[in-house]
C-alpha cells in the first residue's frame, strides 16, 4: 500500500455541520440544544455519570425543565442515538441510490460514516456505540429499525463490490468487520491532527479494497 493518503485528482468538499434532523420547527431550539448537549455529556461522562441537572445546567435551564421535552433520561438517550442514525441514514440512502461506480460509492459511504462518527460536534453515534447497553429494551427496539436500514444499505454496497470483483465476499461478517474497524477510529482519531477525514477515507478504502486496478 502506498504511503500517500490523498488523490490529487479528486476534489475535496469542505467539512459541513449537519443540522439536528429529528427536531422539527415546532420543537424549537431548546429541544435541539438538549439533544446536542446531552450527546456531549453522555460521551464525556457516560450515561450513568450524567444527571438531568447536569444537562439542564449546561443548557441554562432549571433542573426540571428537560422533562417538558422528554419523559425521562432514557428518552433523551434514545433521542441522541436516533439523531445520529437518522443523519447518517439520510446520507447513506442518498449514496446507495446514486449511479456511482461500486468503488466510488463505497468510498462515499466510508467517508460519510467517518464524518458521522468523527466530525466536531458529532457525538451521537459514539454515544450509541458506548452506551447501547444502557438503553432499555423498549428503547432499543425503537432504534433497531434505523440500524437495520443503515446496515442494509452497506450490505447492498458490498454486494455491488463483489459483483464488480473488488471483494471476494459480501457476507454479514465482512460488513461487521468493516464497520467495526471504521467505528474504532473514535478511539484514536484526533480532529485537526494528522489525517483529515477525507485522507482517512482514502486510506480505509485502499486497506479494504487495495489500490485501484
Image (cartoon, rainbow, N blue to C red):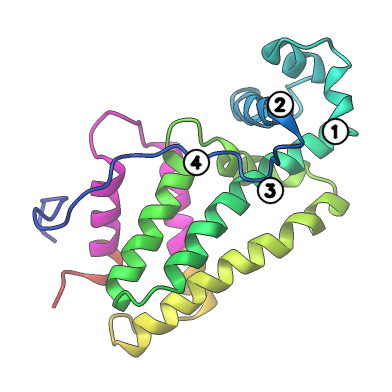
Residue 79: image x %, image y %? 73, 41
Question: Under tag 4, what secondary structure?
Answer: loop
Q: Residue furthest front?
A: 25
| Residue tagged 3 | 82
Q: Earlier in the sequence, mark 1 or mark 2?
A: 2
Mark 4–mark 3 CB contact (< 8 Å): no
Q: Is residue 198 magenta?
A: yes
Residue 187 belongs to magenta span: yes
Label 1: state its secondary structure. loop
Q: Earlier in the sequence, mark 2 or mark 4?
A: 4
Nearer to us of marks 4 and 3 is: 4
Q: CA distance from mark 3 to mark 1?
A: 14 Å
Between 78 and 11, the residue placed more toward the observer is 11
Q: Sequence order check: which comes first, mark 2 or mark 3?
A: 2
Confirm whether residue 169 shows in the render: no
Residue to which mark 4 is pinned: 18
> CA gap, disc 4 to disc 3?
14 Å
The residue singled out by tag 1 in the image is 70
Q: CA distance from mark 2 to mark 4?
A: 16 Å
Q: Main secondary structure of the magenta part?
A: helix
Disc 1 residue crowd, few under 14, some 14–19, many 20+, Cα 10 Å: some
C-alpha span from label 1 to label 2:
9 Å
Query: What's drawn in magenta, residue-wise?
Result: 178-206
Mark toward the start of the polypeptide (3 vs 1): 1
Question: What residue did someone put label 2 on?
Answer: 34
Q: Quadrant of residue 42?
A: top right
Q: Position of residue 47 (x, y in %)?
A: 73, 30
Amino acid at each position: 500500500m502506498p504511503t500517500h493518503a490523498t488523490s490529487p485528482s479528486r476534489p475535496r468538499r469542505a467539512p459541513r455541520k449537519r443540522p439536528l434532523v429529528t427536531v422539527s420547527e415546532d420543537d424549537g431550539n431548546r429541544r435541539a440544544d438538549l439533544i446536542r448537549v446531552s450527546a456531549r455529556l453522555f460521551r464525556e461522562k457516560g450515561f450513568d455519570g450524567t444527571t438531568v441537572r447536569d444537562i439542564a445546567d449546561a443548557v441554562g435551564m432549571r433542573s426540571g425543565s428537560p422533562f417538558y421535552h422528554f419523559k425521562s433520561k432514557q428518552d433523551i438517550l434514545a433521542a441522541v442515538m436516533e439523531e445520529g442514525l437518522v443523519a447518517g441514514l439520510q446520507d447513506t440512502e442518498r449514496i446507495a441510490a446514486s449511479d456511482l461506480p461500486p468503488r466510488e460509492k463505497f468510498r462515499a459511504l466510508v467517508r460519510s460514516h467517518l464524518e458521522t462518527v468523527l466530525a466536531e460536534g458529532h457525538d451521537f453515534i459514539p454515544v450509541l456505540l458506548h452506551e447501547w447497553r444502557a438503553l432499555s429494551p423498549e428503547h432499543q427496539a425503537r432504534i433497531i429499525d434505523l440500524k437495520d436500514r443503515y446496515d442494509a444499505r452497506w450490505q447492498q454496497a458490498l454486494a455491488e463490490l463483489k459483483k464488480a470483483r473488488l471483494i471476494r465476499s459480501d457476507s454479514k461478517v465482512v460488513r461487521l468487520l468493516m464497520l467495526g474497524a471504521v467505528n474504532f477510529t473514535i478511539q484514536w482519531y484526533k480532529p485537526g491532527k494528522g489525517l483529515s477525514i477525507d485522507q482517512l477515507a482514502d486510506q480505509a478504502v485502499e486497506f479494504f479494497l487495495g489500490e485501484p486496478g
